[in-house]
Image (cartoon, rainbow, N blue to C red):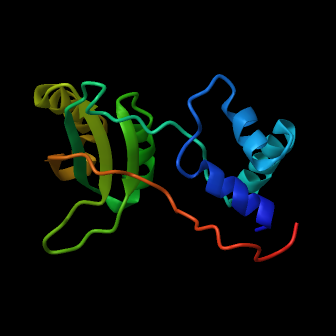
Amino acid sequence: MSVTDRDIVSALQAGLPLVAEPYAAVAADLGLPEDALLTRLEEMQARGVIRRIAVAPNHFRLGMVANGMTVWDVEDARVAELGTRVGALPFVTHSYERPRALPDWPYNLFAMVHGTTRDEVEAKRGQIAEILGTASRASDVLYSTRILKKTGLRLRRKGPTCSD
């Protein structure tokens, strides 16, 4: 990664500034034209250096205080297909397959659901159960008790490590 790319990641890792033209402001702080910043961001994304730039809302402040990670024991042969269907539901914020930790943890499909009440989350969990049908042998829901600060990788600015 070039020094400029590292500087861009460092400048963006805490989030975009809350101004009318955030990329222009970041570019100005870095001494770059805005189009050069955007091009470098696209290139870093294409190379896999940056996975995505996205909003990370605080669900609690949005009134979504019942947050449940639904977990499912799904037939291995169908977990990818069914996980894709579950992940496409409008109320599932993320869905993924994880290995089981037998004998204590039989679940291999996870789907995060948010709601204003636990009853709402349970109703959404019921919709997931309908999709999974008999392919799901067991399930549970783990409710959040507090919100954890989520951050990505944080780079420290140490000076040049490679040239542009």
The mark tally for this picture is 0
Q: Residue at x 79, y 60 (%)?
A: 4
Q: Residue at x 88, y 66 (%)?
A: 164
Which of the two residues, 148 or 114, is positioned nearer the viewer here?
Answer: 148
40 left or right of 143? right
Q: Is residue 39 above or below residue 122?
A: below
Which of the two residues, 148 or 70, is positioned nearer the viewer here?
Answer: 148
- Rendered image quadrant of residue 114: top left
16 left or right of 108? right
Q: Residue at x 73, y 44 (%)?
A: 29
In percent of width and height, residue 123 lies at: 18, 27
In percent of width and height, residue 50 lies at: 65, 55
Q: Is residue 31 above or below residue 116?
A: below
Q: Is residue 116 above or below residue 163?
A: above
- Rendered image quadrant of residue 73: bottom left
In percent of width and height, residue 115 lies at: 23, 28
Which of the two residues, 124 or 118, is positioned nearer the viewer here?
Answer: 118
Q: Quadrant of the N terminus?
A: bottom right
108 left or right of 36? left
15 left or right of 59? right
In percent of width and height, residue 140 lies at: 14, 49
